[in-house]
Amino acid sequence: MTSFTLSKFLAFMLHSKLIHPKNIVVVGGSDNIHSPGGRVLKNLIDHQFKGELFAVNPKQEKVQGIISYKDINDIPEVDLAIIAISAKFVLETVKVLTQQKNTKGFIIFSAGFSEKDENGEKLENEIVELIEEAGGSLLGPNNIGLINKHYTGVFTTPIPKLDEKGVDFVSGSGATAVFIIEAAQSMGLTFSSIYTVGNSAQIGVEEILEYLDHSFEKGISSKVKLLYIESIKNPLKFLKHTASLIQKGCKIAAIKAGSSEAGNRAASSHTGAIANSDVFVDTLFQKAGIIRCYGRNELISVAGILLQKESKGKNIAIITHAGGPAVMLTDVLSKNGLKIPHLEGKDSEALLEQLFDGSSVSNPIDFLATGTAQQLVNIIEFCENSCPEIDAMAVIFGSPGLRSVDDVYEVLDEKIRTSKKPIYAILPSVVNVKKQIREFIKKGNIAFNDEVLFGNALAKVYNHTPVSNKAKDPDSKLSKKIRKLIDALPNGYMSTEPAVTLLEYAGVKFATPYNVNNEAELNNVSKSLSYPVVLKVEGPLHKSDVGGVILNVSTEEELYDSFHKLMQIEGAVSVIIQPMINGTELFIGAKKETNYPHVILCGLGGIFVEVLKDISAAMIPLSDEDALKMINDLKAYPILKGVRGQSGINIKLFSEAILSISNLLSLVPEIAELDINPLMATESDLTAVDVRIRLEK
Amino acid sequence: MTSFTLSKFLAFMLHSKLIHPKNIVVVGGSDNIHSPGGRVLKNLIDHQFKGELFAVNPKQEKVQGIISYKDINDIPEVDLAIIAISAKFVLETVKVLTQQKNTKGFIIFSAGFSEKDENGEKLENEIVELIEEAGGSLLGPNNIGLINKHYTGVFTTPIPKLDEKGVDFVSGSGATAVFIIEAAQSMGLTFSSIYTVGNSAQIGVEEILEYLDHSFEKGISSKVKLLYIESIKNPLKFLKHTASLIQKGCKIAAIKAGSSEAGNRAASSHTGAIANSDVFVDTLFQKAGIIRCYGRNELISVAGILLQKESKGKNIAIITHAGGPAVMLTDVLSKNGLKIPHLEGKDSEALLEQLFDGSSVSNPIDFLATGTAQQLVNIIEFCENSCPEIDAMAVIFGSPGLRSVDDVYEVLDEKIRTSKKPIYAILPSVVNVKKQIREFIKKGNIAFNDEVLFGNALAKVYNHTPVSNKAKDPDSKLSKKIRKLIDALPNGYMSTEPAVTLLEYAGVKFATPYNVNNEAELNNVSKSLSYPVVLKVEGPLHKSDVGGVILNVSTEEELYDSFHKLMQIEGAVSVIIQPMINGTELFIGAKKETNYPHVILCGLGGIFVEVLKDISAAMIPLSDEDALKMINDLKAYPILKGVRGQSGINIKLFSEAILSISNLLSLVPEIAELDINPLMATESDLTAVDVRIRLEK
């Protein structure tokens, strides 16, 4: 590896001096803590950066008690520069730092670059070039910075509580990061690190993920990652590192904003983000094993659950002193497929005797407004030790303002730490026992405040099943045959013959088509036909719209009539004759979008796709299990299996066809669109009847 | 009206002395503000009850500075008694109050009544009897009390800000009421009155609604009502008064907890509430025009929107200084059918010039982190005056901690008050500008903090369309014929003949059935048949399961064979012969649950019901529009209309059949279940082929 490619390689990694600098200069540091430069300096000082810290400020020799240089040329060598000056001065500053000061880490707060206009983009590119030449790393520009255990390099407040078991949080938007940190505070969510990427000029979310993946140390690194993303520039890199982190035992929850059409427009008008249509994001997340969230509250609620012990199952005990919230929580959990098992038996009766008259232990366990801390101990120990049917507990305990809850929250704190089953605390009295909730959080606990928002998040986490099915590589002999065929074809829609050959190579059976150009050929073909057959015009793209499909042709006379009729259609080149096949109509489709792997779609044909939008989607390559899961996830699955005495289809053949198409797509990235519609399925057979494939080389 | 029935009548109303007492005694009042009796006294004193206030306490002559009597017998006459003593002493106390002290208003905090056991229930009934004999009104027992503009009769904290334009809130659960009041505080939601009904021994949610309905004064009373309900004992009364309030211009949002099966169990184990299956609640709310909510956060978010100006349409401008939240809000609104119209044109360009470089005005309107208060003025005035395509604005404005937002929030406050279009404030910086948000709220504003939770609530409100279609009364001649038929029938499943007659009376065409008991009758019938026909065995309940249906019988020979085969089935009484009818399979069904009007269901037959659960439901009586809406709401509606060149069905005939059934059900409350399945529909015809009706007299 030459030094140039090495530097190139390093340039895309996060330089260690960006992560763990021995010294930091704040260019634009000042006494004004209402400016980014002044505030980041204050944050670094307040949160005890352990290295050397200095500033560059043209007017002062000391700012906030630390040394300040009037000229960037005068500073000593420095690992990391945090730059908070007007955009127009940044390039010159970076030049001095990279070329004279051996600086490798850069955080640029300044706005006015690619997010603004073309000139800004040019300037941004020049800065990146300088930094890459020097083998450095740039976070920003137009971001709010970075917080980790080594330093507090952000110009915003509040600075959250840092904890190496807290979440690692990567954000594509600085303001959203701040609002998430603020909302997290009242819940007790702690952070291990926070990265904001701004314009992602050099380091984007993907590169942070790569760093988190490579630097992950089992037992030491935090296992929960949160992402707020507006664009994914490099889906494959994103997939590689998120999937790898999840393989290592991490949990990742993410918001990808801009998922609606109007939202895409909003995202595009924001940081120059490129819009990705939503099914690609959904299937990418699915493939990686990421839990997709749609709002800040949901994201931090999910994180609050992920930070706690893992549950072995979906059976929840709801413990409360107030009926209403328990009923609402029961409703939301049940509706989302979690279980609230009815509890009974000897131990349950013994527990009931320890509670006040009128209590209920059948689950929800209601120990009344007058319930005591000792009763809560008994209840939790009952669920922990005597209820194998219970996997986790949710305790709802507020206060109408009469009694102290200190003893109850102390019990909760202790039991959360010591019990094997996860215990979630829902503390709704955000006014009456505000102080006690704060105390509870200070001990390292998470406090949810709305049982229904919590319940939705819990269901999202508990229902999430990351897939780890390995797809098999397609056969290499097959690969060569297919490659030869594709390379010989032009761009655009393939005609029927090569498309059918391609499907047959891939392993999908097609209803033998005869391509008939003239009456002489028809004479020839007609001898080997068994009726009924279907005739389709070749040439026009939308055959049905021009009356180009004639079904159920049963006699030789009809055959000739139909042939002549079709050949008279404008643009008709030839006629395809196929056997008429009966069965249930299925379809398999595929789409490609820049930089993403193909998404493969499947479903029942006809009204199920057109009216009911009943479609499963997954990103290639698929494993056997993935293909089966796609079929299983269809709402119409019972129809495929056979319902009401009606026979179903052969699901194995359908899933094999999906797999075959997945393999084909892996081998031919040039396929921009593919549509097999319909495939006719019976209990014993599966035959494709029509196919459209568009190549984009 | 005799005095007894008058007192009975009054007993079910809220006595004016409960609402507006001139004097109040707190039985069990003490110096201990951690007890219910002590706390309610403190609340009454702190919040300046204007009448005379005294206590009953066996140990003291003064409590909290007011006169206290040692014996209930010694007190003067008193309008309202708030009772906070042990359950066992309550009956005696009530006896003295009703019989000697002319007391008409009662609030009983004490627990240990019907929610506990049978003895408690008996005691509760005796208390109610005493109070009803005296023509008084009882709130509770086992509740937290009542707050209105006259007094603060609750033993809990916090006491919310009262405002006659705030919400009227009725809660079936005291603790839930407290948690809702607490959560509402940080949003700025104000209350006009709060009622908690506890065990609803005499006054339940329905009676409070009746009171709110009767006492409603246009222009004076609050127009927003919130309900938290665990059971609806009297659905017709509930419907009458909620619908009436909504007719008068009110908006009602409600949680009905216990909507899942497990949730129903939880509700039942709570305050002895009776579980109602969820479709009855859904259709009841629909009929009344109530917005159904599922959690505390959702309820207060919806209330926060309802308290603001009404929007003329669904087109929202999103105004922000931070891209991320605007993108997420755009996503959630678009997904829920609201519009974020793209803004362009001369005025939009003029606005852009007033903003900093890099801003965007295309909607979302992003005026950047550096955006000023004056720019916000310009943007809001642009949306208010120059954008007829905009109906409402959502302003998202937080703070990363550098700048003051006072000026911006002042602009917001002023514009919310003065602009014609509603403006919603989403203020996400709950830590950085906590104080400023509090100030903003103090001025009477609502502040949302999570754009996605807000967006979901906004969509719920904007998509809610209360129906005000009047159902026509069924024909009285029809009524007599039907009544005669029904009165002659026993309980249980009706046999085919009277069921068909009933349908025909109601106006639903039935495929003429011949009931054939023996071969002689068959000889007779066979002459008038036109083939193909269908034969169904009469006798066994589930005909298909015993092979009791033979389709497509085309010849006389087949007819006789089939007849003999069916008559050999166990339990066979006779055979029904009908013409074989083709078309699309539809179904109409109906269910009854204690105290509720019938719910009527419709949909496509076959897999659409069995696999896809595609069913519309509504509560009778239906109007023309209601019946059409039911059909329109089906996911399969495009199939009924005709899709992909396939002809649809006659929707007018289908909706008329639904209406006919609705009329029938109004006339025959004894119908417990009704199932017309299938009805065969074509473009020109609709014929019922099978029907099952169960009577429960």
Image (tube, coloured by chain):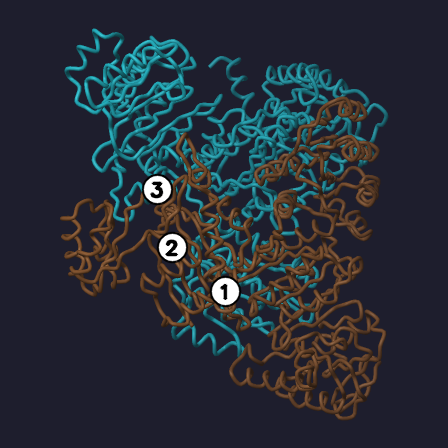
Chain colours: A cyan, B brown
Q: Mark 1 vs mark 2: same chain?
A: yes
Disc ID at residue B583: 3
Quarter of the image with the C terminus of chain A is: top left
The amino acid marked with disc number 3 is: Gly
Left or right of A431? Residue A255 is left
Q: Secondary structure at mark 2?
A: strand
Q: Mark 2 vs mark 3: same chain?
A: yes
Q: Which residue is mark 2?
A: B676
Q: Secondary structure at mark 1?
A: loop
**Cα distance between the residues tagged 1 and 3:** 37 Å
Question: Is tag 1's residue or tag 3's residue first in the polypeptide sequence?
Answer: 1
Viewer-closest of A208 and B591: B591
Residues at badges 2 and 3 in contact (C-beta under 8 Å)?
no
- Residue drawn at 67 percent across, 41 percent down: A179
The amino acid marked with disc number 1 is: Asn
Residues at badges 1 and 2 in contact (C-beta under 8 Å)?
no
Q: Position of residue B391 (x, y in %)?
A: 71, 38
- Residue drawn at 52 percent across, 31 percent down: A211
Total number of numbered labels?
3
Q: Position of residue A277 (x, y in %)?
A: 52, 29
Left or right of B651? Residue B362 is right
Viewer-closest of B358 and A535: A535
* Mark in front: 1 vs 2: 2
- Vertical side of A244 occupied by B183: above or below: below
Q: Mark 1 vs mark 3: same chain?
A: yes
Viewer-closest of B27 and B166: B166
- Vertical side of B417 occupied by A507: above or below: above
Chain at tag 1: B
Disc ID at residue B276: 1
Q: Dot 1: few (<14), some (14–19), or many (≥20) neighbours within 10 Å?
A: many
Q: Give the quadrant of residue A321.
A: bottom right
